[in-house]
Image (cartoon, rainbow, N blue to C red):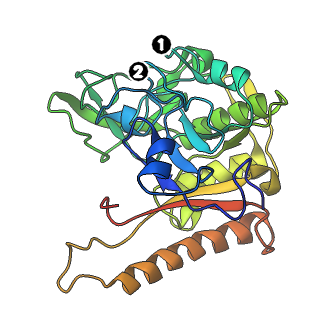
Amino acid sequence: MPLGSIPSTRRLGIANLASKNASSFATTVLRLQSNIPIYQQQLIHSTALAAGPAKAAAEWCGVQDNEHNNIYTVREISAHDTTFARRNISNTIGGNFLSHRANNNNQIYYVDNEPEAGSLISTGDSCGGNCKNPRDWSIDPYLSGCFPDPNNQFWEILGVGFDGNCFDVNDDNYQRIRSAALAYVYLRMKREAESLGRGHIVLPPSAIDAPLGSISAYWQDFYDRVHRDGVTIGGYHEDPIAPANLKAIHIHSYSNNPDGPNPPPTPLDSVAMTATWIRKGADWYRGRYTNGNPIPANILGSPDINGKT
């Protein structure tokens, strides 16, 4: 089914590209068509070449290039800092989601990259350096008032998570956004952006594991709130939406490590495993939310060979 302005015959794209001009790189170096999708990129592309979250996530720093309104880019928005993002709903210097959605048409956004992973706070440079860890536990001011008790309404502590790549970190605990808070942020950002009449689409977060709620209570709670219960936090409420209004289920799928066990998995083994996990997640979603009927939405997936693509 259609996914925004991305042609149905050209769904295969590139993701997590460090180039400051992703579309130009795709067409001139990879020789791909001009309207192939560029997945998981910044809200507004920057000319800065940084190895931190600016590489492919929600952070914005530097001077924007001419791709800031490219309709074939799937852009991350986030209400908080993570290993993969910087908050950019309203207070990002130079550009933010509120201004981007108001000044452009037919944009595709998604809310957070692998939010179920915990992150550590960094004391390093958050813009232009190599640090991927969150700067702090602040919530974007556009939404912070919805969570008057953030430690119990927005954040939850984990025992494990991603270390990022900063040597100087506060490692007292890993924190992540609660599934209920994530559902609220997603439903509200979707409702607001898509009601502007500018052709925007706001996709759900990208999950680490393709099986979703079949193995994860986090994602089952998230999608139950999105499709069944809605969510009320801090006196603010968002209604649930139908599966057809989701537009796409957003997943990652990590294959076996080619440098792992001996003998290593063959390419066919990796493809079979990836297909099995995606099918497991799709079957769980169909059984829980569509009564076993075909899913009335796309599945947006970015496969990865253990970080080696």
Q: Position of residue 294 (x, y in %)?
A: 78, 72
Q: Amino acid at mark 2?
A: Cys
Which of the 4 image quadrants contains residue 105?
Answer: top right
Q: Is residue 21 above or below residue 68?
A: below
Q: Position of residue 156 (x, y in %)?
A: 44, 36
Q: Amino acid at mark 1?
A: Ile
Q: Position of residue 190 (x, y in %)?
A: 72, 36
Which of the 4 image quadrants contains residue 72?
Answer: top right
Q: Where is the C terminus found, in terms of image quarters?
A: bottom left
The residue lying at 66 percent from left, 35 percent from top is 184
Q: Label 2 vs label 1: CA separation?
A: 7 Å
Q: Position of residue 226 (x, y in %)?
A: 72, 47
Foreground of the two, 64 or 277: 64
Indicate left or right for 118 with 8 as reference.
left
Tally of marks: 2
Q: Is residue 265 above or below residue 97?
A: below
Q: Where is the N terminus found, in terms of image quarters?
A: bottom right
> Is residue 145 at all visible to an observer of this figure?
no
The residue lying at 42 percent from left, 29 percent from top is 81
Residue at image mark 1: 93
Indicate left or right for 260 with 150 as reference.
left
Tag 2–tag 1 contact (CB < 8 Å): yes
Within 10 Å of disc 1 (Cα), the crowding (few <14, some 14-19, many 20+) is: few
The residue lying at 58 percent from left, 43 percent from top is 73
Residue at image mark 2: 61
Foreground of the two, 53 or 227: 53
Which numbered disc flags the more N-terminal residue, 2 or 1? Answer: 2
Q: Is residue 9 above or below residue 125?
A: below
